[in-house]
Amino acid sequence: METGNRVTKRLPLYIHPERCYGSLSLSSHAYDSMARIYPFFVFLSFLISSAMAVAMPEVEHSFARTVDRKLMGFRKEKLSHFRFYWHDVMSGKNPTSIQVVPPVSNMSSTFFGTVQMIDNPLTATPDPKSKLWGRGQGLYASTSQEELVLLMAMNLEFTSGKYKGSSITIFGRNQVMAKVREMPVIGGSGLFRFARGYAEARTSKVDFKTGDAVVEYNIYVLHY
């Protein structure tokens, strides 16, 4: 707006001194108050953020995180001993051990290269009709050209009793002609999660005509 030679500019409403919260002195007082309480708000925000970080679970798709085993129910580790008899049946109408890969040569004295798939009964005594505790499922393969040595990869699946539905996993070297063969327990499922230990195998009976064998297993396993 012009008045004579003097030009007066009209300020926009949002910065007009008379319409900006009363007066400039009041605005200055407000700024001073905000300056005093600003550090408090910063500190409060920090506390809230920290609390949320602790309380909120990690993102489900995170690649790796540390977990408290007690929160998963794993409190006290115990040592258990299991003994049963493993029946490797190759003969008859219902064999439990089937050759899926033949030896590389019929002249091999160690049957090198042979692979057997198994679903062998685990019983309380050497008698195949005694109480059935579970099944030994997996495979074994002849891995030596010089002596009879098997690679054992087997899950011992319990089908009755307290441990029904749980399994122990064995993976190791089985020197068949040794009196006692030791193989590692590398894990398990169900009541045997995080299991570790070892298995001892002793031949109880073998029929060299049919290939059928009964082996005593003693399993020593640490688990929760």
Image (cartoon, grey):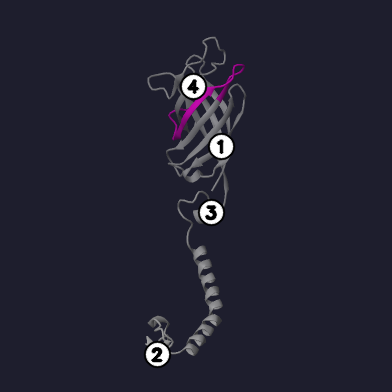
Identify the residue shown where x is 52% and y is 14%. 104
The image shows residue 59 at horizontal and vertical percentages of: 46, 55
Q: Nearer the viewer, residue 160 or 69?
A: 69
Identify the residue shown where x is 55% and y is 17%. 112
Q: Does the magenta segment cover residue 214?
A: no
Against 4, residue 187 (above or below) is above
Circle 3 sits on which residue?
Answer: 67
Dot 1: what SS? Answer: strand
Mark 1 packing: few (<14 Cα in 10 Å), some, or many (20+)? many
Dot 4: what SS? Answer: strand
The earlier-in-sequence mark between 4 and 2 is 2
| Total residue callouts | 4
Circle 1 sits on which residue?
Answer: 185
Dot 3: what SS? Answer: loop
Q: Does the magenta segment cover residue 135?
A: yes
Circle 4 sits on which residue?
Answer: 115
Circle 2 sits on which residue?
Answer: 4
Q: CA distance from mark 3 to mark 4?
A: 40 Å
Comparing marks 1 and 4, which lies closer to the viewer? 4
Against 12, residue 188 (above or below) is above
The earlier-in-sequence mark between 3 and 2 is 2
- Horizontal placement of 95 versus 42: left or right? left
The image shows residue 74 at horizontal and vertical percentages of: 53, 52
Q: Nearer the viewer, residue 211 or 155?
A: 155
Q: Are marks 1 and 4 in contact (CB under 8 Å)?
A: no
Q: Amino acid at mark 1?
A: Val
Q: CA distance from mark 3 to mark 2?
A: 82 Å
* Magenta stretch bounds: 126-150
Dot 2: what SS? Answer: loop
Q: Amino acid at mark 4?
A: Val
Q: Amino acid at mark 2?
A: Gly
